[in-house]
Image (cartoon, coloured by chain):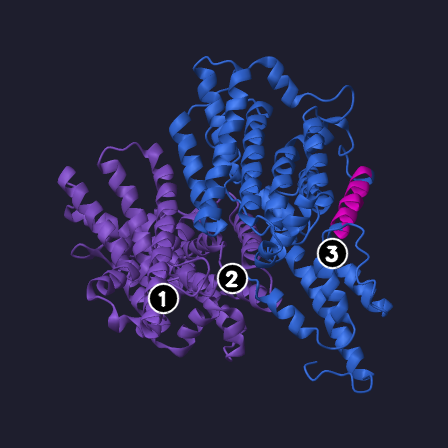
Chain colours: A purple, B blue
């Protein structure tokens, strides 16, 4: 939405009063709005409960966010191409267990992370091939693979589970420790986020994803290799879900056959709250990451200001609805404003 | 979502005769007796077009085959108790599948149905605990379903938001409200005659009593979708919203009423669920939306809208239900059942498209093997 609204601006902007121009720009920077909400929320909580932003508090906020941020970034890449991947929760679960199983058998931690990423990427290939070659709706296919991967996961794991005692101590401390208040996991996530966002912004194949999401038909006619890009998006999403699985293992040290169950809805919420529209072609990975950070922070904020945990889910849902509704209303307003301005310039030329 | 395939389809059928076949197939997909492509002289193309669009009969046939095999080879399948379990457990899914089919045909989707059912059950339990009479509670719960559907529908039609995003939001919101209402309590002491109604069988047969209201709903839904202007309009809206609007169909009102119908039936299902399992909890019917959508899509309702039949959806729902029942009887683990459900779902969307593409390729080969003089388009 924001992308398409931008195009008419250059033609009409020169005559426009500068204040509305600034306002437009602020409204268009969706990421800024989320960041402001986040900062206001954290500040208010800190004023209410001064123990909230202690060193450990900040660390917990960042740690809680890392896993969701990673999966949301992968999901955002897919959503930008006007597709969706509902199987991320199942992929996260199975790759976490794959890494855990390897470590349990005395494997190398680095190798375990690589295995988790590879498992995730492999399922990404499956999803990507089904969606791009089969040309079937992504929602249905990934709903199917959600079931399939969860089922395979349960068959493989059975009633076994990996606990922190099975893992090398270096691996679990990697999941908890950090440099100052910044956990290693958050650093790793930040690196992945910046790299992925840079790729999507500055590489031709990255821009292709936006083109594909804006108009698949136009992108195809313009020579974008549609299938290859969709496959790449799914592989990215799968690989990041796999990496998130490995980090989940490091952070919680506990994986069983139910790990990651139902996670897809949280991830999709984070992406949508972050301003990546389901209609494809708009939004940014930073937005998705901020959306994830906002969602996980709310879940920490509510208990610390004394809201009972039964309210959390309802508030999450209402927040998602608010985010998409406000987004839409703003987009409509901006579009209306631009139309009016265009009409004014037109009548000025005629008069 | 992935509607690119639909857009590209006409462009690729440039070669030879199937063109007319695909054109009519698209428009007539809804009517059961659609003599697809009567204007097409080529018998093979006609047969192919018919095969490609009769996915729902394939599912129906699969269901019949499965039932026949199960009756003959699976121990304990045919006894009345098992059959009543099968139907009783499938009923909630089959109920919601009716309005969901219409909603998906019109090009929208509702993921909040399980949460709406859970919320209705939770409110029912709460009000019952507070001493209200059940005869007042049930209409109130159904009214609540109307409100839930209205919220979804207004957000989608008035604000123009994608239904997928809206109903993921209300999925969380309604379930969250249910949790606020009832906490972690469960209410089980509903009046006996209501509990009996929801679990008893009709006379000495295997059919649960609650199947009767469902049959009534089914007939109403089938008539509305396949034999009234309203139903035709739903197909038109799903096929092309813009064209439907220009044809004078009130698209928004249409969609809104479908959301309300889905919410209402979901709440009714929630009430039934609480009575059938004699327990009202906030997490009743969690994940029901996935079962409903799996069944509906398996029955050949195209997620892009504008295609499908109610019979197909019902066959899809009962195929999944029967398959799960049979797999439990022959000791297939719950985990493997999940895999089978997923595979079926993928096949159900993949198979018709693969068949269509294969048919198209065959027609193209034929056209290029024997080119009619001067009639071969360059695009083939």
As displayed, is residue A43 above or below residue B329?
below
Task: Answer with the quarter of the image where residue A11 lies.
Answer: bottom left
Dot 1 falls on a residue whose secondary structure is helix
Marks 3 and 1 in Cβ contact (< 8 Å): no
Say left or right for A139 vs B340: left
Marks 2 and 3 in Cβ contact (< 8 Å): no
As for residue B62 lying within the magenta part, the answer is yes
Q: Circle 1 marks a residue in which chain? A: A
The answer to whether residue A135 shows anywhere in this view is yes
Q: Which residue is mark 3?
A: B28
As displayed, is residue A212 above or below residue B58?
below
Q: Position of residue B337 (x, y in %)?
A: 62, 45
Say left or right for A62 vs B146: left
**Of callouts 2 and 1, the N-terminal one:** 2
Q: Position of residue B111 (x, y in %)?
A: 51, 44
Q: Circle 2 marks a residue in which chain? A: A
In-front residue for pair B229/B160: B229
Q: Which residue is mark 1?
A: A343
* Closer mark to the observer between disc 2 and disc 1: 1
Distance from disc 2 to disc 3, alpha carbons, whole Å, reads 37 Å
Q: Are labels 2 and 1 on one chain?
A: yes
As displayed, is residue A23 above or below residue A54?
below
Distance from disc 3 to disc 1, alpha carbons, whole Å, reads 43 Å
Residue at screen point 15% across, 46% down: A54
Q: Position of residue A275 (x, y in %)?
A: 36, 57
As drawn, the label of residue B94 is none
Distance from disc 2 to disc 1, alpha carbons, whole Å, reads 51 Å
Q: Which residues are magenta?
A: B57-71
């Amino acid at each position: 939405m924001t992308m398409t609204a931008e195009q008419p601006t250059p033609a009409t902007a020169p005559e426009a009063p500068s204040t509305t121009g600034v306002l437009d720009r602020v409204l268009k920077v969706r990421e800024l709005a989320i960041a402001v909400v986040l900062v206001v929320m954290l500040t208010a909580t800190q004023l209410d409960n001064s123990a909230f932003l202690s060193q450990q508090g900040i660390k917990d906020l960042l740690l809680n966010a890392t896993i969701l941020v990673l999966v949301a970034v992968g999901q955002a890449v897919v959503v930008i191409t006007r597709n969706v991947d509902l199987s991320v929760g199942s992929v996260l679960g199975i790759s976490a267990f794959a890494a855990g199983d390897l470590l349990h058998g005395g494997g190398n931690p680095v190798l375990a992370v690589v295995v988790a990423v590879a498992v995730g990427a492999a399922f990404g290939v499956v999803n990507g091939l089904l969606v791009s070659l089969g040309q079937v709706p992504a929602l249905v296919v990934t709903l199917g693979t959600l079931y399939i991967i969860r089922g395979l996961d349960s068959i493989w794991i059975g009633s076994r589970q990996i606990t922190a005692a099975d893992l090398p101590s270096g691996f679990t401390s990697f999941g908890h420790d950090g440099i100052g208040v910044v956990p290693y996991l958050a650093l790793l996530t930040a690196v992945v986020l910046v790299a992925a966002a840079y790729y999507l912004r500055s590489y031709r194949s990255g821009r292709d994803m936006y083109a594909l999401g804006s108009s698949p038909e136009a992108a195809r006619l313009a020579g974008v290799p549609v299938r290859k890009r969709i496959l790449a998006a799914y592989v990215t999403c799968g690989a990041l879900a796999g990496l998130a699985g490995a980090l989940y293992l490091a952070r919680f040290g506990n994986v069983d056959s139910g790990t990651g169950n139902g996670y897809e809805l949280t991830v999709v919420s984070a992406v949508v709250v972050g301003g990546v529209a389901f209609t494809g072609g708009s939004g940014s990975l930073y937005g998705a990451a901020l959306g994830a950070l906002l969602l996980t922070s709310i879940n920490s904020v509510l208990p610390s200001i004394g809201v009972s945990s039964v309210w959390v889910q309802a508030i999450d849902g209402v927040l998602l609805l608010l985010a998409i509704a406000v987004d839409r209303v703003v987009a409509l307003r901006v579009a209306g404003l631009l139309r009016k301005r265009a009409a004014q310039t037109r009548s000025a030329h005629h008069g | 979502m992935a509607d690119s395939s639909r857009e590209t389809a006409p462009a690729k059928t440039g070669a030879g005769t199937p063109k007319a076949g695909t054109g009519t197939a698209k428009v007539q997909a809804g009517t059961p007796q659609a003599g697809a492509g009567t204007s097409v002289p080529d018998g093979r193309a006609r047969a192919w077009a018919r095969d490609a669009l009769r996915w729902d009969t394939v599912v129906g046939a699969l269901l019949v085959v499965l039932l026949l095999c199960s009756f003959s080879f699976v121990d304990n399948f045919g006894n009345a108790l098992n059959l009543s379990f099968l139907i009783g457990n499938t009923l909630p899914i089959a109920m919601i599948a009716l309005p969901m089919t219409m909603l998906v045909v019109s090009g929208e989707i509702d993921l909040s149905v399980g949460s709406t059912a859970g919320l209705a059950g939770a409110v029912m339990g709460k009000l019952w605990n507070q001493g209200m009479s059940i005869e007042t509670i049930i209409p109130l719960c159904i009214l609540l379903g109307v409100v839930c559907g209205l919220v979804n529908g207004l957000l989608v039609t008035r604000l123009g938001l994608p239904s997928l995003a809206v109903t993921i939001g209300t999925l969380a919101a309604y379930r969250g409200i249910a949790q606020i209402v009832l906490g972690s309590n469960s209410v089980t002491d509903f009046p006996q005659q209501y509990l009996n109604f929801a679990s008893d069988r009709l006379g000495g047969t295997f059919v649960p009593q609650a199947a009767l209201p469902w049959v009534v709903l089914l007939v109403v839904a089938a008539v509305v979708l396949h034999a009234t202007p309203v139903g035709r309009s739903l197909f038109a809206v799903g096929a092309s919203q813009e064209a439907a609007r220009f044809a004078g169909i009130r698209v928004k009102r249409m969609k809104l009423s479908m959301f309300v119908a889905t919410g209402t039936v979901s709440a009714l299902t929630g009430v039934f669920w609480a009575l059938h399992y004699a327990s009202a909890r906030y997490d009743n019917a969690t994940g029901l939306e996935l079962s409903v959508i799996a069944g509906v899509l398996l029955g050949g309702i195209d997620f892009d809208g504008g295609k499908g039949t109610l019979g197909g959806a019902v066959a899809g729902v009962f195929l999944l239900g029967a398959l799960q029942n049979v797999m439990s009887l022959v000791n297939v683990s719950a985990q493997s059942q999940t895999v089978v459900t997923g595979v079926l779902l993928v096949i159900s969307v993949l198979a018709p498209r693969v068949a269509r593409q294969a048919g198209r390729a065959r027609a193209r080969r034929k056209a290029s093997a024997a080119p009619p003089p001067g009639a071969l388009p360059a695009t083939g």
